[in-house]
Amino acid sequence: SLSKLQLKTGDLDPRLFSRLRHLQKLDLSDNLLDKFPNSLTLPDLRVLNCNNNQLEDVTALKQFPLLEELTYENNVYLTPNDDYKVMFLLQNLRLLNGKDITKLANHVRHVNSRKLTSKVTAHWEKFFRDQLPEKYTAEHVKSIKKKFLKSVETNVVYGPSSLSEFTRWRVKMIAEEFLASSLGLEENTDPKPEEEVDENEEESTESPREVAEDVGQVTLTPSKRKRNHSTPSSGNKRSKSQANTEEEAALNPRNAEPLHFLQCHSKGNSREDFKTQLWSCVFEPLLDSGSRKDPIVSSSRTVATCGGESVCLIDCETGIVLKKYKVPTEEFFSVAWTTLTMVISDSRKKTHNILAAAGRRGIVKLIHVAADFCYGEIKAHKKPIATLCFSPTHETRLFTASYDKRIALWDIGIPDCDYNFKASQLLVLEALSIPLRIALVPTCPDQYLLAGCEDGCFTWNIKLDKEQKSRPFEALFQFPDDEGDMTTSHRVDGLAFLNDDVVVSKSSKPGCIYLWSWSRSFDGKGKACQRTVSAVILAELEWSTTDMSYLTLSTCPAKEYVLCGDEKGSVWMYNLSNYTTAWSTAKGKRSDKRIPPTQILKWPELRANGEQLTEVLINNVITDPTFTYLVALTSVNITAIWKKS
């Protein structure tokens, strides 16, 4: 036992450990190890405990081939990808973190490997075999090897996105072995014979780190799909592997197909719950630095959703609920992501995604997703929080908009290695009515915030160099009413920026979504506070004639799309790329006619417990940045996911 000795990696002297040739059990728990030296040897080691360290990588454990029991819980930088790596590397491993992994490990070593080998081989045959000349040189081989390895890592996909790092690790390994055997790049080693596996193991996706509670997930299968209200587009057919490349990442919405319908926010995990309203969803950002950087995937396919007493993380491709967080007395209304740079031992830094969630109780929950840990809460308001928004320029700054008619700006702090953090309130914005949607102005996110409220659309100066910590609004925007007159009194329940200047806002006036110019509507040099200004309207979108409130909209700036659900379960999609250039050059020029939707995705006929789901409202709809997945949240406890076909 070498537990609780403050040991660092450099303290594990290979000269000493290589002499312990009959050591079978080793306890290194509660130390400061960030990795294992590669030459510890320990040829007879059977049991290893590394709990409560700072390990970042597990591949060095392959030097202990007889290892049967391994525990490394509470190493926050290890993920399920590392679990799968040790299961593959350690052929005798039976227990991982106290769980019997025999069946899953068998799947990883044989079924998973067979599938990936088949995909790698097929990729070579289809795209690279003909590129190699009949008489090839070492230079030919070197060049094609580099291209092939990069291509398979990008295009060979298998299993959930949460295991994409493991998959690429194995794909690279398999591809190198394949090239070695087929092109004679290096000495070939005979692969171990594959074992027969039951067919039902083929779809196994269980992880030794499954969420402790039952997620109560029910997948609803469409019994019939209604056709979309658009003409099918023509185009050359592409292979699946080509479609996965970056140039094919953009969704052609006319080819969007329903993928999953999930019932994962049920109260008490009840399968009979078709009443829980789902309100907010946002895609997880990719970590842009650190050892877990993911340069292959252009966008995350993991989405956070909230409604009722729970927050879920869903893999959009597989439909698997990766994690679920519950507060039985809460009703969550909003979720938001930020990426914090946290300092660990030896002053090293790591980036981690943090999810903030809030709702009826007025409390913000802060969740370190990779560690499966809600590390803190901020008692932000005494009334419900309608929506959350992080600053794009300051990772710790969070805006909370509440039913108390206030928008507060918080610094949530950065947790230390023991998750101690200090949150502080920086600013309070006073509203005249309940703020429903908030957006920071892209060209000046540290100076102006825009909010759609129960009784109008307002903007505030949020610059922190001012002494005034409680501020009234700077301006109130007027919009045309039914008669064409300008009015300030209307509920704004949808608000987002399409680009740096164009604002998209939806009011509860039936069928009314306006596009207007921020820069032409608001002059920041104006001295008067609480002034009324007219929104310079660029266009109006044709939408449902319903007067139903709180069906919010979203935008995909990269593809210049606006999306909004309706009271019939349909998603209205508007491609505005043909309009934005004219709006930016022709000052004041407004599109004369309402712009119709490019496409309307109709709600499929779904059956639950033998009965058809009816009266479906789309409360929220978003896409990932690359427009590959579309996620819609409903009033009937169903999360719907579409994907480009």
Image (cartoon, rainbow, N blue to C red):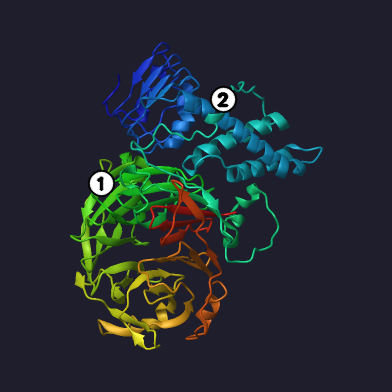
If the image is split into quadrants, where does the C terminus sit? bottom right
Front residue of 230 and 56: 230
Image location of residue 18, percent across then percent down: 43, 16
Residue 208, x across and y down, in percent: 41, 31
- Horizontally, residue 181 falls left or right of residue 270, namely right
Task: Report the residue marked by disc 1.
Answer: 328
Residue 556 seen in the current view: yes
Q: Is residue 470 above or below residue 54?
A: below
Left-right relation of 483 to 146 = left
Q: Please tell me how crowded label 2 is: few (under 14), some (14-19), or many (20+) other residues with Cα within 10 Å.
A: few
> Is 120 left, or right, of 571 in this rendering?
right
Disc number placed over residue 197 in the picture, else none: 2
Label 1: which secondary element: loop
Alpha-carbon neighbours of circle 1 within 10 Å: few (<14), some, or many (≥20)?
few
Is 512 left or right of 335, judged from the image as shown? right
User: Against 315, is 462 above or below?
Assistant: below
Q: Quadrant of the N terminus?
A: top left
- Residue 402 or 145: which is nearer the viewer? 402
Residue 636: where, in percent of width, then height?
39, 55
* Circle 1: residue type: Pro
User: Residue visible at 57% across and 74% down?
Assistant: 578
**Residue 456's image quarter?**
bottom left
Task: Inspect the image, locate mark 2, and give the three-letter code of the amino acid beneath it.
Answer: Val
